[in-house]
């Protein structure tokens, strides 16, 4: 029965990523440096909050072997957005 099914989607089909690989890596590094909310991150890279979060988490795992541990330890393992630090003037 499975071999007789008609598939609508072809292999390799689907939506293409909005960001190129180098832009995805920049997004991850930008987040680690500035720690904006994912909403602000999405605005900077013209993507959604969810796509920014998914992209960050994907590249964080890959870059974990390359970046020093001290940089990665600053990022908490939490599913929520991180608040933007405020300064008292």
Image: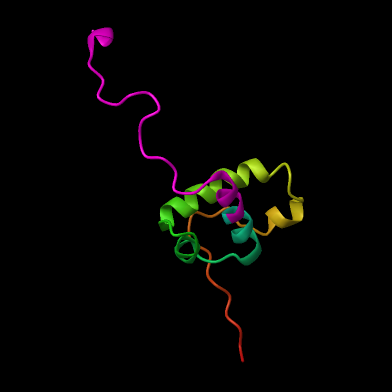
Secondary structure mainly formed by the magenta segment: loop
Q: Position of residue 16 (x, y in %)?
A: 41, 40
Q: Is residue 13 above or below residue 79?
A: above
Q: Quadrant of the N terminus?
A: top left
Q: Quadrant of the C terminus?
A: bottom right
Magenta-colored stretch includes residue 88? no
Q: Residue at x 62, y 42 (%)?
A: 61
Q: Which residues are magenta?
A: 1-26
The colour scheme of the drawn protein is: rainbow
Q: Residue at x 59, y 64 (%)?
A: 35
User: Image quadrant of residue 71?
Assistant: bottom right
Q: Position of residue 24 (x, y in %)?
A: 55, 49
Q: Residue at x 48, y 59 (%)?
A: 80
Query: Which is nearer the eye, 27 or 75?
Result: 27
Magenta-colored stretch includes residue 25? yes
Q: Is residue 34 above or below residue 76?
A: below
**Mark count:** 0
Query: Which is nearer the eye, 36 or 82?
Result: 36
Query: Which is nearer the eye, 68 or 18?
Result: 18
Q: Position of residue 52 (x, y in %)?
A: 48, 54
Q: Position of residue 21 (x, y in %)?
A: 56, 44
User: Image quadrant of residue 5?
Assistant: top left
Left or right: residue 58 compared with residue 12: right
Left or right: residue 66 compared with residue 5: right
Q: Is residue 35 above or below residue 77?
A: below
């Amino acid at each position: 029965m499975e071999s007789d099914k008609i598939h609508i989607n072809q292999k390799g089909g689907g939506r293409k990523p909005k960001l190129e690989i180098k832009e995805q890596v920049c997004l991850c590094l930008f987040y680690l440096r500035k720690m904006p909310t994912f909403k602000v991150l999405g605005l900077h890279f013209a993507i959604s909050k969810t796509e920014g979060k998914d992209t960050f988490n994907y590249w964080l795992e890959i870059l974990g072997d390359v970046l020093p541990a001290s940089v990665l330890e600053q990022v908490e393992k939490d599913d929520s957005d991180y608040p933007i630090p405020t300064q008292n003037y």
